[in-house]
Structures are given as structure tokens and as C-alpha cells.
Image (spheres, helix red, strand yellow):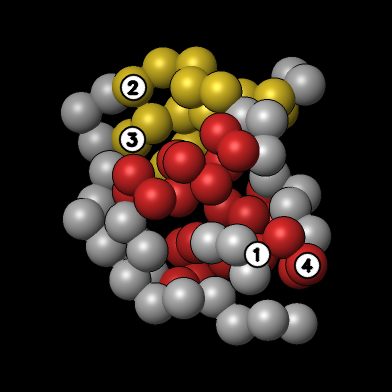
Amino acid sequence: MPKLPRGVSHDRLLRFLRHHGWSVVREGARHTVVGKDGTQVSVPRHARLRTGTVAAILRQAEIDDGSRQDL
């Protein structure tokens, strides 16, 4: 399993999710919610996201380990 990069930004993670078919459902002051096929995932609006947070988001989005290296 490839390691996740450290300090991924909110914008970079959103670009990655959009590249994998997710679209923005709504944006709030603290989170952006993206959706695909009836599933929604919340992405916090932080300058840098912790590695565990990124891993949890990718797990909820069901993005496999092979695609994670593009992040």
C-alpha cells in the first residue's frame, strides 16, 4: 500500500476527488460535501489535512490503494 502524502490541502484533495468522478454537493464555511452515486463525503476546509483524515475520507469514498499514489 503506497503511503499518503503529508499535509494535503483541502483544494488538492477536492481536485483528486473530482478527478475520480465526485462532484461538489454543497459548500459551507467549515466543510465541503462531495457526492457520487448517492454517497456523500465531507471534506474539512483546512489549509493542511492530517494523514488520518485523508485516509478516512478516501476510505469513505471507496478509492482503492492504487489510485492513492496520484494524490
Estimate the spatial distance between the alpha carbons at disc 4 and disc 3, rounded to whole Å: 26 Å
Which mark identifies residue 17? none
Which is nearer the N-term, disc 3 or disc 1?
A: 3
Q: Pointers 2 and 4 in contact (CB under 8 A)?
A: no
Query: Which residue is labeled 3 in the image?
Result: 31
Q: Inspect the image, locate mark 4, and give the three-letter code of the amino acid beneath it.
A: Gly
Q: Is residue 32 left or right of residue 39?
A: left
Confirm or deny contact between disc 2 and disc 1 (CB under 8 A): no
Q: Residue at x 68, y 48 (%)?
A: 60
Q: Amino acid at mark 2?
A: Glu
Residue 40 visible to the viewer: no
Callout 3, which amino acid?
Answer: His
| Kind of element beneath mark 4 | helix
Residue 66's disc number: 4
Q: Picture quarter containing residue 37?
A: top right
Callout 2: few (<14), some (14-19), or many (20+) C-alpha neighbours within 10 Å? few
Q: Earlier in the sequence, mark 2 or mark 1?
A: 2
Residue labelled with disc 1: 68
For the residues marked 2 and 1, what is the alpha-carbon distance in whole angstroms? 24 Å
Q: Are marks 2 and 3 in contact (CB under 8 Å)?
A: yes
Label 4 crowd (10 A; few <14 / some 14-19 / many >=20): few
Q: Secondary structure at mark 3?
A: strand
Image position, residue 55 (x, y; %): 58, 65
Q: Check whether the beta carbons of the residues at disc 1 and disc 4 lie within 8 A of each other.
A: yes
Residue at (68% x, 30% y) in the render:
21
Q: Nearer the viewer, mark 4 or mark 3?
A: 4
Q: SS class of the residue under badge 2?
A: strand
- Disc 1 element: helix
Q: Mark 4 vs mark 3: which is more N-terminal?
A: 3
Residue behind mark 2: 27
